[in-house]
Amino acid sequence: MGGEELLVATIQENVRVQLAHLRTHPGVAARLRRGALTIHGWVYSIPTGDIWAYDEDKGKFVSLTAGDR
């Protein structure tokens, strides 16, 4: 893995870490427990227009734009 792939993987890992961090915030955690809030992690590539969303059930990012090509 190198270049663009490494950059995307690094950005995606940062989004996963930030989602985990958000879940520890008392206001966010309380609303998540009540089902009053959902949070989403997306990564957007400006040069390519690709969008990936983090899928909690799969434990990975999935492309939202793969079928557009």
Image (cartoon, rainbow, N blue to C red):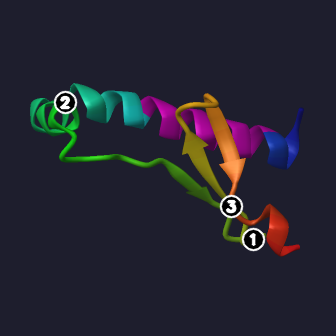
Q: Considering depth in this image, is 61 or 47 the residue closer to the camera? A: 61
Identify the residue shown where x is 48% and y is 47%.
Answer: 41
Q: Residue type at mark 2?
A: Arg
Disc number lying in front (3 or 1) = 3
Q: Considering depth in this image, is 16 or 39 the residue closer to the camera? A: 39
N-term mark: 1 or 2? 2
As drawn, the label of residue 64 is 3
Q: Is residue 2 left or right of residue 50?
A: right
Dot 2 alpha-carbon crowd within 10 angstroms: few under 14, some 14 to 19, many 20 or more: few
Dot 1 alpha-carbon crowd within 10 angstroms: few under 14, some 14 to 19, many 20 or more: few
Give the x, y percent position of residue 5. 82, 43
Give the residue number, with chain letter if any, for mark 2.
33
Q: Considering depth in this image, is 12 or 39 the residue closer to the camera? A: 39
| Distance in Å between CA atoms under marks 1 and 2 | 37 Å
- Using the rendered view, name the quadrant where residue 44 is placed: bottom right
Question: Which quarter shows the N terminus?
Answer: top right
N-term mark: 3 or 1? 1
Dot 3 alpha-carbon crowd within 10 angstroms: few under 14, some 14 to 19, many 20 or more: some
Look at the image and give the residue range highlighted in magenta. 6-17
Q: Residue type at mark 1?
A: Pro
Give the residue number, with chain letter if any, for mark 1.
47
Disc number lying in front (2 or 3) = 2
Identify the residue shown where x is 56% and y is 31%.
Answer: 57
